[in-house]
Image (spheres, coloured by chain):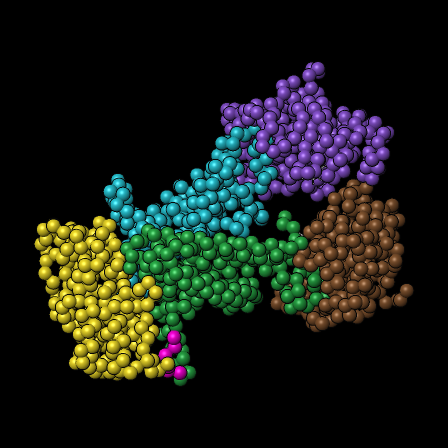
Chain colours: A brown, B purple, C cyan, D yellow, E green
Amino acid sequence: MSKVPALELNDIHKTFGDAEVLKGISLKAYDGDVISILGSSGSGKSTFLRCINLLENPTKGEILFNGEKLGLEHGKGPDLYPTDMRQLTRMRQQVGFVFQSFNLWPHMTILENVMEGPLNVLKRPKHEVVEYCEHLLNKVGIADKKHMYPSQLSGGQQQRVAIARTLAMDPQVILFDEPTSALDPELVGEVLGVMRGLAEEGRTMLIVTHEMNFAKEVSSEVVFLHQGLVEEKGTPQKVFEAPESERCKAFISSTF
Amino acid sequence: MSKVPALELNDIHKTFGDAEVLKGISLKAYDGDVISILGSSGSGKSTFLRCINLLENPTKGEILFNGEKLGLEHGKGPDLYPTDMRQLTRMRQQVGFVFQSFNLWPHMTILENVMEGPLNVLKRPKHEVVEYCEHLLNKVGIADKKHMYPSQLSGGQQQRVAIARTLAMDPQVILFDEPTSALDPELVGEVLGVMRGLAEEGRTMLIVTHEMNFAKEVSSEVVFLHQGLVEEKGTPQKVFEAPESERCKAFISSTF
Amino acid sequence: MDFSVIVEYFPRLMQGTWVSLQLIFLSVVLGGIFALPIALARISKNPLISGLPFAYIFFFRGTPLLVQIFLVYYGASQFEVVRESFLWPILREPFWCAIIAFTLNTSAYTAEIFRGAIQAIPVGEVEACKVVGMTKVQMYRRILLPRAFGIVLPAYGNEIILMLKGSALASTITILDLTGMARTIIARTYTPIEIFLAAGAIYLVISMVVIAIFKQVEKRQNRYLGPNPVKLPDDV
Amino acid sequence: AADKVRLATEGAWAPFNFIDSAGKPQGFDVDVAWALCAKMKADCEVVTQDWDGLIPGLKVRKFDAIIASMSITEERLKVVDFTNKYYSGGLRFLGLKGEAFNIADLKGKVIGAQRATLGAQYLEDNFADLATLKFYDNQDNVYLDLVAGRLDVVLSDELPTFDWLKTSGNGDKFEFKGDAFLKEDNIAIAVRKGDKLKDKLNKALDEILADGTYQKINAKYFPFSIY
Amino acid sequence: MIDLSGFGNQLLLGAAVTVELALASLAVGLVLGLLGASAKLSSVKTLQWIANGYTTIIRGIPELLTVLIIYFGATTVLMAVAGLFGYEDYIEIGPFAAGVTALGLTFGAYATEVFRGALQSIPKGQNEAAVALGMGRVRTFYRIILPQVWRMALPGLGNLFLVLLKDTALVSVVGLDDIMRKANIAVSSTKEPFLFYSAAAVLYLGLTIISMGVVYFLEKRANRGIKRA
Ligand SMILES: Nc1ncnc2c1ncn2[C@@H]1O[C@H](COP(=O)(O)OP(=O)(O)OP(=O)(O)O)[C@@H](O)[C@H]1O
Ligand SMILES: Nc1ncnc2c1ncn2[C@@H]1O[C@H](COP(=O)(O)OP(=O)(O)OP(=O)(O)O)[C@@H](O)[C@H]1O
Ligand SMILES: [Mg+2]
Ligand SMILES: [Mg+2]
């Protein structure tokens, strides 16, 4: 394991209007880390994750990818904007993002959804891409649906496609924002299964989730956010079994 | 307790097009019974509940309310239609229904929603209705919101209004179709609390739910549906701890 | 361009504006009144009841208003029976012919708007009526119509604007509405651009006033709607 | 396109100009137009345009001349030039057969005319406060409403009405009322102010009057001279 | 076809003109609509301002007046502009060109709103998904957004086309030989208004039905594989 973190965030702040949603969050993820981010609704988990690849513009802070700092500068408002769009685009290609609501493109088939990135963004040759993407769809267990459209799939299947779409870019880090919370209880298992596989492969992942058992089982580190700050962090054993903070304790006990 | 069931369903069938969704379900609910209906998605729980007060027209079967049989006759298609709309209307006034998605009327305030039934359907005098409905809103814990509109309330609050609206008709039986599954995890407790109170009052209720702990705790009887048939039924102890059917066993273990 | 003609003929343009306003007001009110029963009949599942409104709506939405006006004004008066009937005192007046054509036309469009609104009410709200044991009449009176009224407003505002613009066609059957007056003035002054622009500006002002009024009404009527108001389906 | 001469007519003023069932403009005006073109050796095109758009259209150069039985009036002279007359007419009232008629009786009656014509202008100037006036986009609609009974009396040019009484099958129900007036009504071709085309047209007009072409055309439509 | 006193053929010729006018105006209107929607959604204030002015004015003025203003006014304006560039010759704006301009402007103003609605109805998440993959803004627009706009806008555009089809009748007042004017001419000559206006109505209904069929077909094609909620 290299000594440079794959992803490093320093003192990330974010305000929406008058509300300070993130009040300075720092985090390091080394290759192979699986970091779970917990916290009650509104604590800023999604906002933090979205700041990482600038789906949301932070108001303060540093983002480093493999030790390379993402250039940020102030625009008109309080937000920070990328100095160099090409640097950002390059970084985004290496940081995957899996959304709560899948966000598949409804006008493309499953296979087209997955191929879009490697084919049109990375400009890989088509035959290679087809083969690789079919392999990925196989891996997430929906190779047989590849010519169907997203609306013809169940939520769990759609989320697995979304994961395959992210994997197709072969990102170094994958961010997951509550990937199972839009799913019916019975479909959650399918997606968690796929994610468990990725963790075992040694993928670097940041996961926002409400599935405590899952977090406990796969994480190398757990971070508990509260009102825009890191309230508690450590190994799953520590955070789940012997949390120091009262709030973390209350949260853990209410959700188990 | 009278020997005549408050609600009796005999051999209810329902087909949608070619698909037979209910294949003959019978059930008796005596005064004070709390019957939970479980089953995996698509097993026909909602359809069964909706057949009881003819939100869905069954294709075969008998519905008796306090021993009075609801007149049904065939129309053009395979469905059964009420012979006498007035009988159905009378019966519906005595059978409450709480929806998964609340279905409050958005153009009326909370209080108006609750008063609508007793005032305009049952034609009770206004001053009486106001007093009674305020009492009910108090009971479900949202008396202070009575002049607000549904869109201004959280999901859990809306569902409690919906329950108050149903109670305002003072129905003999209340049907609940997954009353908490459209709610965020943190709001579920509020609604289950109100329902627990109703069960303790001795209300007759049929509840479709995924909340196993709740079902276990409040039910006098549990019915497990599978592919349109009753696969298992009995006391909560029996169904949850010693289910006979393999499928029921698998379902119970997967959801606990 | 010679803008002094606009000043000179402004009083006559105002006369025409007054006629236009009368035409619009009467046809919108009458059209609205007829539209509701047509919409309710159109919703019926019984083809015997919904067939006629369907054909009616189809005809009036499928042909140009200009054709409809000519049919009422010149077409009907071609027949001896019409001219001898008790309706003739009304049908001989171009003003009433315009009202008839506009009312028939706008009631067809408005009926479709009502139908769309009633059908856009989430089915759950209708089921909630059923389960408290409301009769059909109670359901329409207490829930569906008040609800539809709120949903209908934006589309209905649009329909009034369309009627406002359609009313310009009254000028083709000798009525001196705003457009008719403009054309008559031009017959004297031969300054089409100036006078038509002036008339256009007056129409624009009227429609802005209508839009502003509807914004206000909508705000009041729909204050109960949270962030996600029900939208009319596209095909209305 | 510079040498092409576009002549506009209305197409709803039988027998002077109308459109036949093949969609072509026909009539006295149109025949005269072609005869003039032949004399001028010009490349001509005859287009149609609604009556009240004729002068506006001429002004914005949609065409170069109007040959549509247009009377020379002072108001028109302010915006266009006219050639010499190519025929003359007069105004005459038209009403139900058998009814007694007196100009004074028109008070309170409904009188119709085509918008932007000499007749309409006469009515506006003399009857605006006395009778109900109705103006139409074209003369055919005036007749339609007269037959329908919406109009008591119509004021229009005598010659086309003469033709209408003869050919439309309504001659047994309607008749001229009173005598023709404004007989000095000279009908001519309108051109843009200062356009040289006027002189060419005048020259050609003289030629067809001189060589008998005009008389032949006249005879095709009327049993008497309308010049 | 019934003979209609020899005017049946003329009415059919008129129908052809009506269709040509409608299709030409449609093409102009679609372009204007896309431009208008892009302007309204752009962050440039001036563009928003122009687009808002355009849609407000056009939607507030009767189509009949728009046709008349363009027919009588556009030549003057155009020639004044051309005069600035030293071009003095006559510029022809016939009834057809005036009709296409007026109806295209009208269609474009309404289509602006349709396209805007369609653009906005595409869930933000789809855009974000593309951005998160490292797609640029331009590629995201034409790979992800545009293909869906067409599908979302189709029903609205279909309605607008039906309105446009009927508005073509207005161009008859400036002398275009469409269905309506042919009917007027036939009435002139035969004195049978009821017959010919009814015939015109039937022709318009026929065109409406055909257009509805085409729109239905297009919608079905555009919605291949996409289940309507
Ligand atoms: N675009 C926005 N504009 C204004 N406020 C926002 C915006 N996005 C989020 N917020 C606010 O920021 C806070 C944190 O939101 P965030 O979505 O990050 O919470 P979360 O921890 O992900 O919660 P959940 O578990 O419900 O997803 C909330 O109070 C939210 O209302
Ligand atoms: N209106 C309908 N038309 C056609 N099929 C229907 C209709 N309503 C329900 N079904 C089908 O009937 C079956 C049973 O549906 P039902 O909603 O009763 O299941 P459920 O047990 O309530 O499931 P869930 O837990 O997901 O609510 C499903 O396969 C469903 O697709
Ligand atoms: Mg979140
Ligand atoms: Mg269900």
Residue C196, image x, y percentages: 33, 64
Does the magenta-highlighted stretch encompass residue C29? no
Q: Give the residue at x 26% y 48%.
A: C93
Instruction: Establish if A150 lies above or below B143.
Output: below
Of residues A254 and E11, the one nearer the viewer is E11
Relative side of B130 to B100, left or right: left
Residue at the far bottom: name it. E86
Residue B251, image x, y percentages: 81, 37
The C terminus of chain B lies in quadrant = top right
Residue C59, image x, y percentages: 43, 48
Relative side of C161 to B68, left or right: left
Relative side of A23 to E200, left or right: right
Q: Is residue B228 visible?
A: yes
Where, by quadrant of the figure, is residue B95 drawn?
A: top right
Of residues E51 and A146, the one nearer the viewer is A146
Residue at the far right: name it. A1
Q: Give the residue at x 60% y 54%.
A: E220
Instruction: Establish if D42 lies above or below E142.
Output: below
Q: Can residue C220 be seen in this view?
A: no
The N terminus of chain B lies in quadrant = top right
Q: Give the residue at x 20% y 79%.
A: D208
Instruction: Establish if E111 lies above or below D66.
Output: above
Region rendered in magenta: E87-92
Residue E89, image x, y percentages: 37, 81
Magenta span: predominant SS is: loop
Relative side of B101 to B84, left or right: right
Of residues E76 and C214, the one nearer the viewer is E76
Where, by quadrant of the figure, is residue D14 drawn?
A: bottom left
Q: How many marks?
A: 0
Q: Give the residue at x 81% y 39%.
A: B255
